[in-house]
């Protein structure tokens, strides 16, 4: 029975890792749903496992994107100065919260993520201005067959959003990518592919900061962590190849509706309506 469970976790990890790397979410969004609604383990253990999934996804996908020069490392390091403290604070807050409060926070985050994905909030408007901080970037777009150069706008807003993303990551174990990608793309005017690649790089650092707290508290289930990490790594490797070729709006819209559905499920679970 345990072997079958671990096999299912491994296979689902491949799916979650692939979608996470393609959309810049880190894989944690789907894994936290899987652990809470399918495997039905306590929410704090599910969050800890999801953080490990995010670290694995980011390590694999992030290395590929850095090699392909799609990741804006300078921008990522600047934003992480706010994200990491937020992630640590969020982890301590989550461990002090009752499980149903954490589930309610997760449901709210999923509602936001689903609505953002369905609405296709993205911007391909390229901003070019004097780059005094040296955080602009460029990358070669395989789909366009051309080099895309861009500057970064509204850095202060991005820093505040990164702090919020860190808090969310530490509480619900999703790495913060669902907040970082829309903010970088829509507010800071970073092209969607660069936003997704940079987010994949950042979420691993963010998740690692939170995971240390959960590990120190003995919340991490190491047996479930093994198939989770291996599945995520394989899926992330596949997902990175997909992003370099295309950014399908249909895939993001479908994922948005799925997240909205499971947001409702999590609200019901948090309210004690769904019990199993």
Image (cartoon, rainbow, N blue to C red):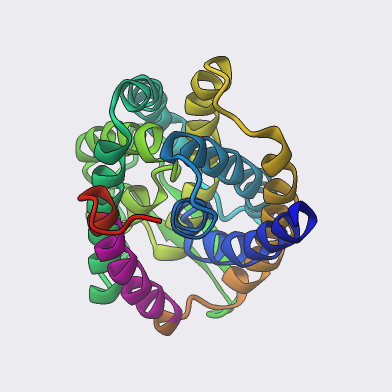
Which residue is drawn at the image coordinates 45% and 51% (left, top)?
36
* Figure label count: 0
- The vertical placement of 34 against 201, above or below, is below
Task: Please state the horizontal and vertical placement of residue 189, each as a whole percent of the image.
Answer: 29, 57
Front-lying residue, 8 or 136: 8
Pick out the residue farthest to the right: 3
Task: Please state the horizontal and vertical placement of residue 215, each as a whole percent of the image.
Answer: 58, 22
Task: Please state the horizontal and vertical placement of residue 147, each as a whole percent of the image.
Answer: 54, 67
Q: Is residue 254 magenta?
A: yes
Residue 122 visible at all: no
Q: Is residue 81 magenta?
A: no
Front-lying residue, 9 or 87: 9
Pick out the residue farthest to the top: 216
Front-lying residue, 24 or 48: 48
Residue 239 visible at all: yes
The region drawn magenta spans: 251-266
Pick out the residue farthest to the bottom: 250
Query: Could you say which quadrant of the image residue 124 lies in?
Result: bottom left
Query: Could you say which quadrant of the image residue 175 lies in?
Result: top left
Q: Quadrant location of the N terminus?
A: bottom right
Pick out the residue farthest to the front: 276
Q: Is residue 162 left or right of residue 249?
A: left
Which residue is drawn at the image coordinates 67% and 63% (left, top)?
14
Q: Is residue 50 left or right of residue 240?
A: left
Task: Please state the horizontal and vertical placement of residue 69, each as a whole percent of the image.
Answer: 62, 53
Q: Is residue 206 left or right of residue 1?
A: left
Front-lying residue, 238 or 174: 174
Q: Quadrant location of the C terminus?
A: bottom left
- The vertical placement of 195 against 264, above or below, is above
Query: Could you say which quadrant of the image residue 255 lies in?
Result: bottom left
Decide whether the magenta segment is chiefly helix, strand or loop: helix
Q: Is residue 205 left or right of residue 170?
A: right
């Amino acid at each position: 029975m345990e072997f079958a469970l671990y096999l299912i976790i491994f296979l689902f990890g491949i799916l979650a890792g692939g979608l996470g790397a393609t959309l810049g979410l880190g894989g944690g969004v789907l894994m936290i749903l899987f652990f809470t609604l399918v495997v039905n383990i306590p929410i704090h253990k599910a969050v800890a496992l999801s953080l490990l999934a995010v670290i694995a996804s980011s390590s694999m996908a992030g290395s590929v994107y850095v090699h392909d020069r799609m990741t804006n490392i300078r921008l990522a390091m600047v934003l992480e100065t706010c994200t990491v403290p937020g992630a640590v604070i969020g982890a301590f807050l989550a461990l002090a919260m009752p499980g149903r409060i954490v589930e309610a926070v997760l449901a709210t985050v999923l509602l936001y993520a689903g609505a953002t994905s369905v609405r296709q909030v993205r911007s391909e408007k390229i901003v070019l201005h004097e780059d005094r901080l040296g955080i602009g970037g460029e990358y070669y777009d395989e789909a366009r067959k051309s080099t895309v150069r861009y500057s970064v706008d509204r850095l202060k807003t991005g820093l505040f959003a990164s702090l919020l993303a860190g808090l969310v990551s530490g509480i619900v174990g999703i790495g913060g990518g669902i907040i970082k990608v829309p903010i970088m793309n829509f507010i800071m005017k970073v092209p969607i592919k660069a936003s997704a690649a940079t987010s994949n790089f950042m979420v691993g650092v963010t998740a690692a900061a939170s995971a240390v707290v959960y590990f120190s508290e003995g919340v991490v289930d190491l047996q479930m962590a093994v198939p989770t990490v291996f599945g995520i790594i394989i899926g992330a490797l596949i997902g990175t190849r997909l992003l370099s070729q295309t950014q399908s709006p249909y895939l993001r819209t479908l994922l948005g509706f799925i997240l909205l559905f499971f947001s409702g499920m999590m609200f019901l679970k948090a309210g004690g309506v769904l019990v199993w």
